[in-house]
Image (spheres, coloured by chain):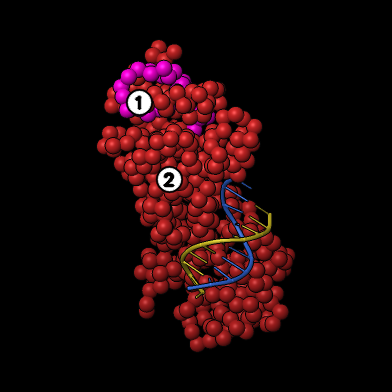
Chain colours: A red, B yellow, C blue
Amino acid sequence: MALPTNIRALVIDHDINLLNAIEKLCYQFNYSVKTCSNVSDAFNLLLGKKDIFDLVLIEAKMPDMDSYGFLLHVTQQINIPVIMMCADGSTSVVMKAIEDGACDYWIKPLTESLIMNMWQHVARKLWKENKNLELMSEKLPLIDQKIEEVINTSVKKGSVEKNNDKLGSSTKKKRLKWSPELKRKFVSAVVELNIDKATPKKILAMMNERGMTRDHVASKLQKYRNKLKRGGETKKQRKQNKTAEATTESKISNESSEFDFEAYDASTLHVVPMPTNFTHQQISNESSEFDFEAYDASTLHVVPMPTNFTHQQISNESSEFDFEAYDASTLHVVPNNFMPTNFTHQPNNFPHQPNAVPVKFYQTDSEEETSSSASINQQQNCNGFGTNSIINPAFINTLDAHFPNAQDQNVFLAWHHPSPDSFQ
DNA sequence: GGACCTATCT
DNA sequence: TAGATAGGTC
């Protein structure tokens, strides 16, 4: 006999919605499942075939045929465990089902845990018969793994909302909470696959996250792609930016940017909208000709900062991405609180560096002292800047001229890590 | 019928 | 807003 790889269930109910819900859950728990909306179809399925199902789940009150007659036939003739289910939980009804051979009686609305533990009836039967040990050994590890997954996701990690949905009354799926760790794994997978080749199924496989489904990943991927298209900006941010542009003198540019990240054209020192294909950026260690590097959103690979982009700014609103950085060696997202010191571009309201002092960014081609509020020495204290940094006084002057209140407004600022005595 | 994508809902 | 869901296409 060929050994099946998991529990095969036959589910019979006139309620199509319930059938669909049970079917989904069965897939989730690695059960193979066949559904029937009437008893006669189920009968035909079973006729002459003894080994195609390990378990039958049937509604006690089916309109087309007597469920109890079916129960007797299946338990006595085919010897498959049968679970009866019904909204009627009166003692007499339950007793009749058990007397007629049902291995269990489920009172509707059903719960996920009932479906999850369905395997136990199969296991009990096999143990009772003390045979098919190979079959058991093959089924049980799979089931155990699935159950562990459910427990891990719904209880241990709290990443899945409490299981309180009742089948038969509501078929709503539980809502998945994307924890920072899940997000990190998601982005890592996307990065590894490349954004243009990353599909929900592949991402799901790479994440190997217990309790997570393709639908979850697909939904997340859609949001993630939308975010990349917008350059990481939220609606609120866009609205705020537009308001700010309209009301303040420090207009960033004529062409109002729809991006979180803005850049300067080095030749004109004018702000230009950041191309959509640049998302996260970081200061390179030293390998690059440029101080700045960016991520190409299409590949999520680090690319040298184009020469005409001298620096960028991250919006001052928190977003999913504002508080994340990429480890340049692995391209993995680094949790906020582990933000490496060589990431200088961070949101203006970055909360994990209470002592950080905002300083202006600038770039130059001489090593002269400048009139800027930050000296070369101070600049060296800015992570990512070194003695080789290029300083362009014209740029600073431009900044000062155009943005006299820059520091107040926290625009065009980076974070200077604490060395307070070196910073006036 | 599954995988994927987009639009829409909650 | 984040996540779920519906519906269309391949």
Q: Looking at the rendering, which quadrant does residue A371 occupy?
A: top left
Towards the viewer: A200 or A410:
A410
Q: Position of residue A362 (x, y in %)?
A: 40, 27
What label sits on residue A132 in the rendered view? none
Q: Do the residues indicated by labels 1 and 2 lie within the same chain of the protein?
A: yes
Q: Is residue A356 magenta?
A: yes
Residue type marked 2: Phe
Disc 2 crowd rating (10 Å Cα; few below 14, some 14-19, many 20+) is many
Image depth: mark 1 or mark 2 in front: 1
Furthest toward the bottom, the residue is A48
Q: Write down the chain letter for disc 1.
A: A
Which labelled disc corresponds to residue A391?
Answer: 1
Q: Which residue is mark 2?
A: A278
Q: In this rendering, is residue A32 above or below A252?
A: below
Q: Position of residue A279 (x, y in %)?
A: 44, 44
Give the left or right position of residue A134, taking residue A271 as reference.
Answer: left
Q: Image quadrant for the N terminus of chain A?
A: bottom left
Name which residue type carries label 1.
Answer: Ile
Q: Residue at x 35, y 27 (%)?
A: A364
**Mark 1 residue element:** loop
Q: Give the side of residue A403 with respect to residue A105, left or right.
A: left
Q: Main secondary structure of the magenta part?
A: loop
Q: Which residues are magenta?
A: A347-375
**Residue A32 visible within the image:** yes
Element class at badge 2: strand
Q: Residues within 10 Å of mark 1 (few under 14, many from 20)?
A: many
Q: Nearer the viewer, residue A99 or A286?
A: A286
Quadrant position of the C terminus of chain A in the picture: top left
- Which residue is pictured at 67% across the width and 75% down the height? A14
Q: Is residue A303 left or right of residue A242?
A: left
